C-alpha cells in the first residue's frame, strides 16, 4: 500500500476585500463561494478578509447570506463545517444596483470604506467580474472613473475577468483596450478555469521536471497530437447563450488552446508568470492558419440530432429551448492545426470538442512515430499498438503510456499493453471546485495561471479565419452527429485523410 502525499501547506493569502459583481449568479453560488469555503477550511484565507456581493436585485444582506449559505451547502464537496460557514458568511456585505449605474459605485465606495474601517484588509481590493460579458467593460470603466480601482499607499487593486473574453478578435482587442485604460496588465487576471485543474497544471511538470520526455518532444519523434474535450452534457437550458456562441468560441480559444499551448510551448527560462506566459503566447502565435476559404478543409462543424446519451433521451439541438429552429451554430468542432516552428513543423495538432457525446472525456494524446517494424514483418500492422502518451485530464486523472510487448510463448506475437499512473493512487486531493488555486493565486499576486492580453489575442487570431469562413459558407458543410455518438463521420475523415484515426471517446 503506497503512502499518499498531500499538498505542502501554503501561507494564508494577502488580506483583502473581495467584491463579486454578479454575486447572485450561478457561478458565484456554484463555484466561487464553495471555493472560498475550501480555502478557509485549508487555512488559506487571510484574517482580514471580507466579501461584498454586487448584483442587480434589491435585497437585504440577510437574504443574500441565506442564499449563499443555501448554495454552499448544496454545492460543497463533502461534509460542511458549520463553524467555517458562520465565519465566512459573517464577513459578507451586499449591494443591489445596476452594473452601469454610477449610483452602484457610490454605494460600493461607501461599503468599502465601512469594511476597510472595520476589518484589517490592508485596503487591498479584488474585483471579480462574474457577470454577463456585456458588463465587463462598463464595470471596468466605472471602477476607473470612481477611483475605486486606483492603487494607493501600497494597497493593491486586482480584477478577475471570467470568460468569454470577447467573441472574436475585434471584440477581444476592444475589451483589452477598455480594461487597460483603467488598470495595468499586472492587475488584470483573465480566468480560464482549465488552468485551475491539477491535471492541466501538471502538463508543465511532466514536461519540464523530467529529463525523459523533453528530448523526444518534437517533430523527430512525435507523429501528431490529439486534444479531446468530450462532453455528455447537452446545451440544456443555456440555449440563448450557446446558440450565439457555438462550440468553437465556447471551448477552443480558451480551454483547448490552453492545453495546446502547454503541450507546444518551449521550456520557459523561469517558472514564473512572465516567462511561462510569454512561451505560451509564442506557441499560439506560431499556429499557421490560411486566411481564406481553404481553412474549411481543416475543420469540421456539426450539430447533434435526437438520440440517447446513456439513459437520457436528447432532442435535436435545433429543438432546444431558445435555439433558432434553422440555426447553423455548431455543437461539435474538430480542427487540424499546424504549429509552424522548428519543434513542431509538420506535426498536426487535431482538436475536437462537442456536446452530447458518448462519454465525458478530456485528454491530450501524444502519438509517437512508428518504429521501423521490418523485424516483425509478419505481424499484421493492425496488431501493433500505436505508441501513445495519454494525459487524462478528466474524469480519469492519469497519465498512460501505450507500447508493444511480446505475448509469452514460443512464437513471436506482439500485443499492445499499457502503463498508467493515476493521481488517486499517489496523492490525497483536498476537495476542490477548481477555482481555489485561481482565487488564491490572484490574492497573492501570482498571474501565471491567468491569460495575458497577448495570449488572448493570439488565440482569437487563430480562430478568426474559421469563424469568417463558416459565416461565409452558411449552412454549407454543416454536418450532423447522433447524440450519444463519438461525433460526425466527417471528423473521422479529417484524420483518415492523413492516414490517422481518433482515439475512442469511451
Ligand atoms: C465552459 C463552457 O467554459 O466549460 C461550457 O462554457 C463547458 O459549455 C465547460 O461545458 C466545460 O468545463 P469542464 O470543466 O466541465 O470541462
Image (cartoon, rainbow, N blue to C red):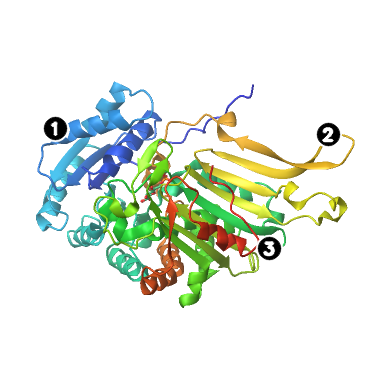
Q: Name the residue rendered at 78%, 50% in the picture.
A: 380
Q: Which residue is mark 1?
A: 62
Task: Tell which tag, 2 or 1, sits nearer the viewer.
Answer: 2
Residue 126 on image: x %, y %: 29, 48
Circle 1: element type: helix
Apparent side of residue 295 relative to residue 330 in the rendered image (left or right): right
Q: Is residue 360 above or below residue 105?
A: above
Q: Which residue is mark 2?
A: 408
Q: Which residue is mark 3?
A: 219
On the image, the x and y values in percent for residue 174 come to: 30, 69
Residue 447 shows in the view: no
Neighbor class of circle 1 (other Cα within 10 Å; few <14, some 14-19, many 20+) is: few
Mark 2 Cβ inside 8 Å of ligand 1: no
Q: Can the viewer see residue 397?
A: yes
Residue 499: x, y in percent?
A: 66, 61
Q: Are marks 1 and 3 in contact (CB under 8 Å)?
A: no
Q: Is residue 124 left or right of residue 483?
A: left
Q: Earlier in the sequence, mark 3 or mark 2?
A: 3
Task: Estimate the spatial distance between the alpha carbons at disc 3 and disc 2, rounded to whole Å.
Answer: 34 Å
- Ranked by sequence position, the earlier of labels 1 and 3 is 1
Report whether 43 appears left or right of 51: right
Pick whichever, 16 or 262, lies toward us. 262
Q: State the CA–CA distance, disc 1 to disc 3.
A: 60 Å
Q: Is residue 34 above or below residue 467?
A: above
Q: Residue at x 55, y 31 (%)?
A: 424
Q: Disc 2 on helix, strand or loop?
A: loop
Instruction: For marks 3 and 2, give the one nearer the viewer.
Output: 2
Q: Earlier in the sequence, mark 2 or mark 1?
A: 1
The quarter in which the C terminus is drawn is: top right
Answer with left or right where residue 71 lies relative to residue 448. Answer: left
Amino acid at each position: 500500500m503506497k503512502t499518499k502525499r498531500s499538498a505542502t501547506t501554503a501561507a494564508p493569502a494577502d488580506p483583502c476585500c473581495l467584491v463579486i459583481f454578479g454575486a447572485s449568479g450561478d457561478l458565484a453560488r456554484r463555484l466561487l463561494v464553495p471555493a472560498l469555503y475550501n480555502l478557509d477550511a485549508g487555512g488559506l484565507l487571510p484574517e482580514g478578509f471580507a466579501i461584498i456581493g454586487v448584483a442587480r436585485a434589491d435585497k437585504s444582506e440577510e437574504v443574500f447570506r441565506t442564499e449563499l449559505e443555501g448554495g454552499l451547502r448544496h454545492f460543497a464537496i463533502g461534509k460542511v463545517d458549520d463553524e467555517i460557514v458562520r465565519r465566512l458568511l459573517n464577513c459578507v456585505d451586499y449591494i443591489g444596483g445596476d452594473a452601469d449605474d454610477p449610483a452602484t459605485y457610490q454605494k460600493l465606495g461607501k461599503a468599502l470604506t465601512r469594511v476597510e474601517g472595520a476589518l484589517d484588509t490592508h485596503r487591498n481590493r479584488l474585483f471579480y467580474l462574474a457577470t454577463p460579458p456585456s458588463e465587463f467593460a462598463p464595470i471596468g470603466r466605472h471602477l476607473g472613473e470612481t477611483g475605486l480601482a486606483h492603487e494607493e499607499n501600497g494597497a493593491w487593486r486586482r480584477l478577475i475577468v471570467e470568460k468569454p473574453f470577447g467573441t472574436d478578435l475585434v471584440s477581444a482587442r476592444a475589451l483589452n483596450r477598455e480594461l487597460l485604460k483603467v488598470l495595468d496588465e499586472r492587475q488584470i487576471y483573465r480566468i480560464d478555469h482549465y488552468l485551475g485543474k491539477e491535471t492541466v497544471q501538471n502538463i508543465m511538470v511532466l514536461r519540464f521536471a523530467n529529463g525523459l520526455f523533453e528530448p523526444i518532444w518534437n517533430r523527430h519523434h512525435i507523429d501528431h497530437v490529439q486534444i479531446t474535450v468530450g462532453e455528455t452534457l447537452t446545451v440544456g437550458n443555456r440555449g440563448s447563450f450557446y446558440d450565439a456562441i457555438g462550440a468553437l468560441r465556447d471551448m477552443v480559444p480558451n480551454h483547448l488552446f490552453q492545453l495546446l499551448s502547454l503541450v507546444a510551448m518551449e521550456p520557459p527560462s523561469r517558472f514564473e508568470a512572465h516567462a511561462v506566459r510569454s512561451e505560451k503566447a509564442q506557441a499560439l502565435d506560431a499556429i499557421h492558419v490560411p486566411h481564406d476559404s481553404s481553412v474549411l478543409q481543416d475543420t469540421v462543424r456539426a450539430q447533434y440530432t435526437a438520440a440517447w446519451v446513456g439513459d437520457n433521451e436528447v432532442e435535436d439541438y435545433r429543438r432546444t429551448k431558445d435555439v433558432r429552429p434553422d440555426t447553423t451554430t455548431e455543437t461539435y468542432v474538430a480542427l487540424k492545426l499546424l504549429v509552424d516552428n522548428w519543434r513542431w513543423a509538420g506535426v498536426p495538432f487535431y482538436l475536437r470538442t462537442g456536446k452530447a457525446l458518448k462519454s465525458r472525456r478530456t485528454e491530450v494524446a501524444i502519438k509517437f512515430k512508428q518504429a521501423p517494424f521490418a523485424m516483425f514483418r509478419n505481424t499484421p500492422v493492425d496488431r501493433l499498438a500505436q505508441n501513445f502518451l495519454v494525459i487524462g485530464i478528466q474524469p480519469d486523472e492519469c497519465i498512460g503510456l501505450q507500447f508493444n510487448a511480446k505475448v509469452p510463448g514460443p512464437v513471436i506475437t506482439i500485443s499492445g499493453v499499457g502503463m498508467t499512473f493515476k493521481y488517486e493512487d499517489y496523492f490525497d486531493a483536498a476537495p476542490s471546485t477548481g477555482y481555489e488555486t485561481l482565487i488564491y493565486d490572484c490574492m497573492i499576486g501570482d498571474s501565471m495561471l491567468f491569460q495575458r492580453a497577448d495570449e488572448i489575442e493570439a488565440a482569437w487570431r487563430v480562430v478568426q479565419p474559421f469563424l469568417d469562413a463558416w459565416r461565409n459558407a452558411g449552412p454549407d458543410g454543416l454536418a450532423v452527429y447522433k447524440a450519444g455518438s463519438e461525433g460526425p463521420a466527417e471528423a473521422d475523415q479529417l484524420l483518415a485523410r492523413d492516414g490517422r484515426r481518433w482515439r475512442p471517446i469511451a
